[in-house]
Image: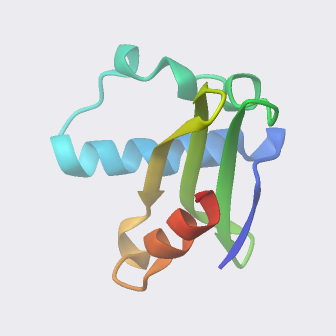
Amino acid sequence: MIITPIQVHQSEQAKNVILSGFLERFGFIDHSLNPDIHDISTEYDGTQHHFFVGKENENIICTGAIRKESENTYQIVRMSVLSPYRKRGLGRIMLQHLE
């Protein structure tokens, strides 16, 4: 897996990775609860909030982001791995990258 900062053209695919995880876990998606993924490239601008994608063969299979909460504190958010790619340690790799 190759991890890179998200590019604008990848936003929709990354959003779909996150939403597929929500649907799998909760059985429904409430779009009002996730305003930050409506426009990922604006919300995660790469200055204070950062969004990363994990790719395999140019397909986004994993996501992870950090949001700045204070001068020395970031929150890890939007960790998701597509179902067929789980149990390979990809979430752990993304987490290490975010840390």
Task: Report how many numbered discs are placed on residues in the image.
Answer: 0
The residue furthest front is 72
Q: Residue at x 70, y 31 (%)?
A: 44
Q: Image check: 12 left or right of 63?
A: right
The residue furthest top is 32
Q: Image check: 42 left or right of 89?
A: right
Residue 54 percent location from the top left of the image: 64, 66
Q: Is residue 92 above or below residue 35?
A: below
Q: Image check: 45 left or right of 31?
A: right
Residue 5 percent location from the top left of the image: 78, 52
Q: Quadrant of the C terminus?
A: bottom right
Q: Is residue 92 above or below residue 88?
A: above
Q: How is the image coloured?
A: rainbow
**Which of the 4 image quarters holds residue 89?**
bottom left
Q: Residue at x 63, y 66 (%)?
A: 97
Q: Residue at x 22, y 33 (%)?
A: 28
The foreground one among 98 and 39 is 98
Q: Residue at x 43, y 77 (%)?
A: 85
The foreground one among 44 and 66 is 66
The residue furthest bottom is 88
Q: Is residue 73 above or below residue 24?
A: above
Residue 78 percent location from the top left of the image: 48, 44
Residue 55 percent location from the top left of the image: 67, 70
**Which of the 4 image quarters holds residue 33?**
top left
Q: Quadrant of the N terminus?
A: bottom right
